[in-house]
Amino acid sequence: MDYKMLREAIEDAEDIRNVLAHCAWLWLDDEQAWAVQIARGSWSNVPRSDRARRSKRIFPEGQLLRAQTLKSYVKGIDGIIGHLRQLQSAVENQLLARHNS
């Protein structure tokens, strides 16, 4: 099991969770997508000298998320759950083997 990849996948899932929990969402019929307003962080393409005036709290970022993208997030989280179940099983087997010896 590649623990570095698992850690990175969990960090990505945490970012997605934060978007789901803390951002404003609006369904756009004409786009057939969710418009998400992200009001955390700072703009990466703004010069450092202007970044304080371009906080996403003041100037939120808008992104479109389509159903296919959200489905891929769910698939990724399912993969994480599968890896964590494998890890749990391996730990339980080691504890059981240690207890029986």
Image (cartoon, rainbow, N blue to C red):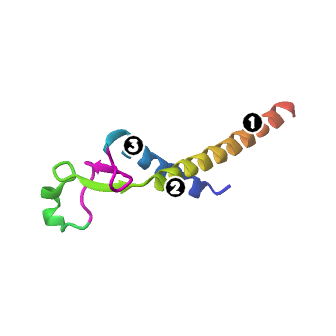
Taking depth in this image into account, of 4 and 32 the one nearest to the observer is 32
Q: CA distance from mark 3 to mark 2?
A: 18 Å
Q: Secondary structure at mark 2?
A: helix
Classify the position of the N terminus by image quarter: bottom right
Percent position (x, y) of residue 10? 52, 49
Q: Nearer the viewer, mark 3 or mark 2?
A: 3
- Most extreme residue toward the top is 99
**Which of the numbered marks, if any, corresponds to residue 20?**
3
Which residue is label 1 attached to? Answer: 92
Residue 65 screen position, x and y as percent: 39, 54
Question: In the rendered view, would you say 83 is above or below 93?
Answer: below
What residue type is disc 3 on? Leu
Query: Mark 2 sits on what residue?
Result: 8
Q: Amino acid at mark 1?
A: Glu
- Which residues are drawn in magenta? 26-44
Which quadrant of the figure has residue 5? Answer: bottom right
User: Within 10 Å of the Cα at label 3, are there few (<14), some (14-19), or many (20+) other Cα atoms?
Assistant: few
Local crowd at mark 2 within 10 Å, few (<14), some, or many (≥20)? few
Q: Would residue 82 appear left or right of 57 to someone viewing this image?
A: right
